[in-house]
Amino acid sequence: MTTRSGTQRPNPDVVVVGESLIDIITTSVGPVEFAGGSGLNVAYGLGRLGANTGLLTVLGADPRAEAIRQHLDSAAVQLLPGATRLSHTSTATASLDSTGSAEYAFDIEWTMPRVSPTFIPKVLHTGSLATFLEPGAAHVRSLMKFFSGRCVITYDPNIRSHIIGDHAQAQQTFEATACLANVVKLSDEDAVWLYPGLGTADVAHRVLDLGVQVVAVTAGAEGSDLYSGSAQVHVPAPKVTVADTVGAGDSYMSSFIAGILTDSRLDFEEEQLRRLGTMAAAAAGITVTRHGANPPTALELREALAVAS
C-alpha cells in the first residue's frame, strides 16, 4: 500500500474493519474532541504497540476526517483505500458519570466500501457498530467469510444497545458474526445484555459452542475470564486510579491481538490464555489512568508487565 507521503509500505499484518468517528466528551472546561470509534481505537492501539496495522473504515471529507487521519498517522496505522465516502464524519457525544464511565449519543453512518482482498493478513479484527449497522454490516460478514480459515479472526461486539435496535435481531446478528471468528471478546455488560438470565460463564460456553476457539469476558476492575475448549483462566485487573474508562475495552482487544501476533502456536491452553489475558489487562489498566482512548505504547506495556511480574 502507498501512504499519503507516497512511500510504499508492506501489507498490514492486522486489518481492522470498523467505524471511525470523533468522540465529543463533555468536561468541566467544555467539550473536547478526540478521534474514536471502536475500530479506530483498536487499530490505533495496535499501531502504538508496534503492530503493522491497516484500518478499513469510512470518513467524511471534512476537518474531522483530517484529524482522524493525523491520529492514525501518529501510530503508523495505514488507512486502507475507499475511506472517504460520507457526507460528514460520524460523531459520538460522551457524557461521563462520577466513576468515569461513558454514555454515548451517536451520529453515525456505516457504508463500508466494497473490497476485493489482494493479500491475507495474519489477523482480521472487527466489531462494535460496524457489525450491526447496515448496509455495512453485511459487507463485514462477507469479508469475514472470505478470510475464514485463512487467518485469525477476532471480534468484539461492544454492544451499544440504544443504537443497534431490536434485541432478538441483535442477538441473531451477534451469533451470525461470532460464528465466523476464532476469538470473541465480550464485556460482562455485553454478555448480560445479549443473554439475559445467563451467567457470564454460561454465555462464554454458549459462544464457544458456536465454533469460537477463545472467549474473553471482561469485567472492569473485577478482571477478565478467558475460556477455550480446553482451559479457563481468571486474570485480575491491575489496581490503578481510574481517570475514565473510554477506550479500555479497545485497548484490551489491541493488546490481545498483539499477543496473538507474537505466538504462532495458538493452542489456547491455560498458559497461553493467561499470557494473552495478562497483556491485555495491563494495556487496559494503563488506558484507564488517563483521559480519552489513549492506549499504551509497546514500551509502556513492557514496563507495566515487568512491574507486575
Image (spheres, grey):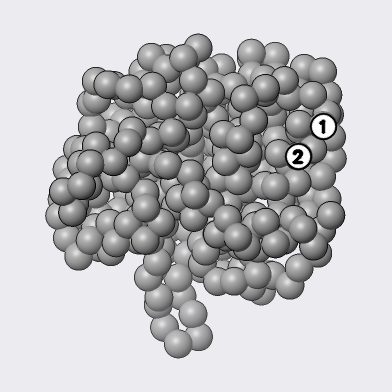
Residue 208 percent across, percent down from the top left: 70, 19
Question: How busy is the neighbourhood of tag 2: few (under 14 within 10 Å), some, or many (20 plus)?
Answer: some
Residue of label 2: 275
Residue 234 percent across, percent down from the top left: 84, 40
Which residue is situated farthest in the bottom direction here? 29
Residue of label 1: 271
Question: How busy is the neighbourhood of tag 1: few (under 14 within 10 Å), some, or many (20 plus)?
Answer: few
- Report the amino acid beneath label 1: Glu
Q: Is residue 67 left or right of residue 51?
A: left
Q: Note whether 164 is above or below 91 in the view shown.
A: above
Residue 197 percent across, percent down from the top left: 77, 32
Query: Does residue 165 show up?
Result: no
**Cα gap from disc 2 to disc 1, whole angstroms:** 6 Å
Residue 2 percent across, percent down from the top left: 20, 41
- Report the amino acid beneath label 2: Arg
Front residue (pair 23, 126): 126
Name the image quarter holding residue 284.
bottom right
Q: Residue at x 70, y 35 (%)?
A: 216
Work out which quarter of the rendered image holds the C terminus and state it: bottom right
Q: Is residue 67 left or right of residue 301?
A: left
The answer to whether marks 2 and 1 mark residues whose Cβ atoms lie closer than 8 Å is: yes
Q: Which mark is residue 50?
A: none
Front residue (pair 148, 209): 148
Q: Note whether 280 is above or below 126 in the view shown.
A: below
Q: Secondary structure at mark 1?
A: helix
Work out which quarter of the rendered image holds the N terminus and state it: top left
Q: Secondary structure at mark 2?
A: helix
Front residue (pair 201, 4): 4
Q: Residue at x 76, y 68 (%)?
A: 240
